Amino acid sequence: MNEPITDRHPFGHAISSEEIRARFAGCRQWEERLRQIILLAKALPELPEALKTPETALSGCENRVWLGHVRQEDGSLHFYAASDGRIVKGLLAIVLAAVEGKTPAQLAGQDPLAPFVDLGLRAELSVSRAGGLAAIAGRINAIVDSYIAN
C-alpha cells in the first residue's frame, strides 16, 4: 500500500454528517433516499485487498463487509470499511461520516446508527440490512470499548 491509510476516504471530513443530512433533507420517497445512498457508495474509495482480512471481516451481514480502524497520533480513530454490496457500501459511508476522526471518549456511549433514525432510513431497511448494521455498530462499539477499558 503506497498511500497512507488516513487518506482513504472523505467521510467525516470532506463529507460530514451535516452534509449527508442536507442531501437527504429534500428526499420524500424511498427511491430518492436510495439514490443518495448509492451516490455515497460511489464516494467511498475501494479498500485495498491487503486490508480485507479475517480480522476486519464482519459476520452477520448479507454482503461481505470489512471494517477496521487505526488510532491516530492525536488519539482519534480512523475507520476504514468496504462492502461488496453497493447499498451496504453507501450505508457504511453514512456510519463513517458519524464516527470518523473522533476519539474513543467522544464515541463512548454514542449510537453509531443514530444517523439512520435522523435521516429517516431506519424504518426503510430490510431485516437483513438492519442486522448487518447492528454488526457494524457492534464492531465500532467493541473498538471504542477496547480503548476506554485501557
Image: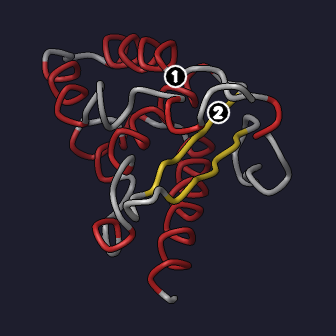
Picture layout, residue 90 above or below residue 60: above
Q: Residue at x 42, y 11 (%)?
A: 39
Q: Position of residue 98 (x, y in %)?
A: 33, 46
Q: Residue at x 48, y 28 (%)?
A: 9
Q: Position of residue 22 (x, y in %)?
A: 15, 23
**Closer-to-camera residue (80/21):** 80
Residue holding disc 2: 82
**Closer-to-camera residue (61/72):** 72
Mark seen at residue 133: none
Q: Determine whether, in the image, residue 126 is placed left or right of residue 29.
A: right
Residue at the bottom extreme, as displayed = 149
Picture layout, residue 111 above or below residue 147: above
Residue holding disc 1: 44
Label 2 element class = strand
- Identify which amino acid the numbered label 1 is placed on: Leu
Label 1 element class = loop
**Mark 1 vs 2, N-terminal side:** 1
- Identify which amino acid the numbered label 2 is placed on: Ala
Q: Determine whether, in the image, residue 88 is placed left or right of residue 25.
A: right
Crowding near pointer 2: few (<14 within 10 Å), some, many (20+)? many
Picture layout, residue 91 above or below residue 137: above
| Quadrant position of the N terminus in the picture | top right
**Closer-to-camera residue (75/90):** 75
Labelled pair 1, 2 in contact (Cβ < 8 Å): yes
Crowding near pointer 1: few (<14 within 10 Å), some, many (20+)? many
Q: Residue at x 57, y 45 (%)?
A: 127
Within the image, what quadrant is residue 102 found in? bottom left
